Image (spheres, rainbow, N blue to C red):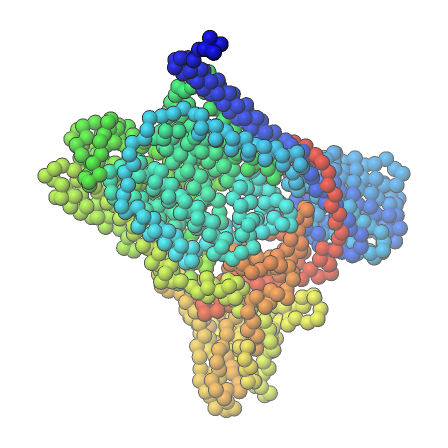
Amino acid sequence: MDRWSSPAPSASTTDAGRSRNRRWAAWCWHLLALCAGLAGIGCAVALPFAPVWAERTEVHWSGESTTALFAPYRPAEFTASVPCPALRGAPDRPTTVLSTVPEGSTRDGLVLTTRDGEPHLVLGQREVPLPAGTCGLRIESGADGTAVRTGGAPPILLPEVPAPEIFAFRTDLDPAAGVSVTARPYSWFDTAPTRGKSDLAVTAVVLAAASLLLLAAHGPRAPAAAPRWRSGLRLPVDLAVAGVLALWLLIGPNTEDDGFAMMTVRNYEVDGYIGNYYRWFNAAEAPFTLVQHLMRAVAEEGPAVLRAPSVVAGLLTWLLLSRGIVAPLCRGNRAAVPLAAVFFLACWLPFGLGIRPEPAVALGLTATVAALFKADRSAVPAGWLGLAAASAGLTVAVTPTGIAALVAVAAFAPRVVRLLARPGAVPLPLAVPARLAALGCLGCLGLVAMFADSTWTGVRRATHLHEAFGPSLGWYQELNRYASLLSTGPWGSASKRLAVFLVLVAVLLAAACALRRLHCAPEMHWAPEMHWAPEMPGGTGIPGLPPLLGSVVGVFAVLVVVPSKWTHHFGALAGVGPALLAVVVVLLARVGALERARREARLLGMVGGLAAAGAAALAFRGPNAWPFPGELGLPWADTPVRPLDSPPLWLAIGALAGLGTWAAVRRRGGPGWTAMPGAVLGSAALAGVLVLLGSFLTARDDRVSAADCGLADAVEVLPLGAALHPVPGSAAEADGFTPTDVPLEPAPPTASAAVEAVRATPHAWASTAPGTGSLSTPWFALPPVPDGQVVALRVAGRPGDGTALRVEFAAGDRTLGTRELRDPPPAALPYDDPRRGRPAPARAEWRVFTLDAPPPGADRLRLRAEDRSTAADGRLAVSGPVLREVVPLHRVLAGSGPTLVDWPLSFHFPCHRAYPRVGGGTAASPRALITPAAGEDSMAYDPTMGGVFAGVPALAERYEVPSRLRGAPGAVWGHLLLASYGDLARDAYATRVHRERIGGAAGDPPYPFGG
């Protein structure tokens, strides 16, 4: 039997076979990674051009005059048809046959009129001569211009005249006259992915996941990482940070843009894309819509839930920066993590809470940097490089500031190149392309997030509109951002200044240390039991400083080229900025212990201490100002944060820290000079956190924050109840006062849906400025005031400062008492008001004073006014008293129809759902408007900003209903206006939608601004 058996293989033969099999397997896995990576990149790159379903909306009108708010104002295609009988049958008087703009408007619309029986056509402020005897008219506009057809005559071609702007369809003719319009709005963004495009996106994601697994499983291997140093303070610090973030979720203010961002998400169900609800023609935010799509899951929730994702992002950012950046870079220093927590809160609290995208950018950037640091310490570096690539790509998809993640990757380029070129199981000519392809596939996840729901054409058109309307500022205008940061409003609050200025000081100190190579320490052995670093002949043992510094500088560099210059973009620093601050403070402490760096330590201590003190003082020179209603009752809302705005205070803190540290460590050597900037930076950050938390805890305003529906519950509306009439036989005694009129306001609601304007009382008087005089009004009968009503009057001017206004109550001939009427103290004064604490300047506008709880038994009242001021603005005017209802705002909104809440306030109306829909190239006409205290000066109504509701001020008369913020008489919360469109119906047109399959690079042409 033995002679027929094969000889047993030798051990060397078996090992050689296994080695050969492993090599072949490695080749196969790398080829698979190369193919998967290239295929994933191809799918992602093809996504913007993949076919989509375009939804085309057609607007049809024929009948009564109506509002028609188009967004954009010009349609892509326009056809107007006027039959011959309509022209011939027009009255002899001047008659509007068809107009697409408000009467008297200077907008580029279509106006067809007849005068003396002859038609006259104006297109875009250009009169078009019509042939004599024109009977019947057809106007067609499209991408090639406009053609006017008049019966059998040759068409009048106007190649440079685009379609007319449309805000209304107006006609003086009978609806049966046959005048009609068909218009198709632009549909750049009204697209939905086809099955093929969805498959491309899914394939790209699957291939990216496969690439990550291949990188982790078959990438190059590295030596085992050094043992990790752990701090016993980590868990308590984590809990403290989480607790502060949770508290801030409940008490923190809103950002300037929370309402705007909320409406872009809430309106998605109507228009099918993330559009700019208020402006830019409702252009898409493409391609930077990743966060908004994620927010759709909570879009209908209240403020706390809407802001919860930002808090989750903040907590994840903290965990990443504390474990992935600060701990590995500052090994051996027990104070590093608690110090990083203080810096993190100082940077995150002013910028991180809300529904803007900056918290996501901070998270993505921090994750990218942490993954790149981890790749240098991990046994599977390629896997961490893959995570960094995916994080960077997704961060870019959040907002333009997210490009800073790519700059961070560039800052780590030497390390990345070294890791990619590390030898492995296959030759480098195959290994390096395979690794690059896999990393590229993971980075292209950003393209998938950008273009899964948008197209190449959509992004181009959105960019065109954003650049046309602005803000689109150049890199050389970056100083505008810092000018806003140094302003005295919410853009330049002390806490926002502090976060930015501290990071800038850290950048300067880190750059100085890096240039002198003080961060290097070859072969350092850390002793965790030591508070300060041991003897370090070569450096300080933080070789990761340069790439971290480059990542922070990258944020500032990207902000230079970002076209908008708002201060909230600094929120992108909330992750890597605090990490750099903590690392710099630890680095300075170690530099102070270097024998070879005594001169550098003195310079860093003196210059750094001065810079940190100046930065802290300049930051706290700003007010503790926040958007309404966050400023209500807030300490330092209109003053510097005193005494923290004093440079000597911070210099003293730095000097005491330096002396104390020197005295504590003088025998064994240690930081003395370099303790000064570290102490000032840490103390300023801690003070900033305490100021924020303390001020909002002490000034918490439950009127708004604790109300289920925000301002809708906190505001009381004062509609007209009934006028009070003079007692028979009583007359006014006026010297220097003359009768005047009070403003129109809506009448009490009736069964009719139309808004009727009335004057609350016919009795009103005004002094003749700059003369002087006195007034004693008639006695007005005062009936018993029922529950839910108050006595009120209107006043213009400011009682006081040379004028006086009193109300006198009586029962029959017996006087019961007198009250002096003055404006309540304002909730906040202008920061630069030189008259600190004095009343605000005189106000000329009419406003409502309420007289709560008249004296018991009073059956009449009269007003006594005196004007002793000769100033030009010393006028005083007063109306007769009336009874007004006191109605919660939410009850008024429930019966008002579509109500447009302007963007500065919309976040504080979480229960409001009856907002005007915007979609399909049109916007519904609102019946009521809620505006901030500044009034209607808003981009939503401004055509120069692409305001979606720009037609409302021109088409509607707006009448304010008096209102007040309950319990805050000195605060002007905003205004409630009811809109009356007169003879125009609201949105009396029909729409029809059909779908068309187009390529991602196809679609409607650009908007013709120059027409």
> Could you tell me how many numbered marks the image carries?
0
* Image quadrant assignment for residue 286: top right
Q: Position of 939 compared to 429: left or right?
A: right
Instruction: Return the x and y of residue 234 as percentages of the image width and height.
Output: 30, 46
As rendered, which of 155 and 401 lies closer to the eye?
Answer: 401
Q: Is residue 921 visible?
A: yes
Q: Position of 1002 compared to 504: left or right?
A: right
Seen at 46% across and 43% down, the residue is 360
Seen at 70% across and 34% down, the residue is 998
Instruction: Return the x and y of residue 663 as percentages of the image width and height.
Output: 12, 44
* Image quadrant assignment for residue 827: bottom left
Seen at 85% across and 51% down, the residue is 178
Identify the residue at the far left of this view: 667
As rendered, which of 818 and 179 lies closer to the eye?
Answer: 179
* Image quadrant assignment for residue 423: top left
Instruction: Return the x and y of residue 326 as percentages of the image width and height.
Output: 32, 39
Q: Is residue 256 visible?
A: no
Identify the residue at the far top of this view: 3
Classify 624 as above or below 156: below
Classify 383 as above or below 248: above
Instruction: Return the x and y of residue 970 as percentages of the image width and height.
Output: 44, 66
* Quadrant holding the C terminus: top right
Seen at 35% across and 56% down, the residue is 693
As rendered, which of 214 and 598 lies closer to the eye?
Answer: 214
Identify the residue at the far front of this view: 1
Classify 825 as above or below 37: below
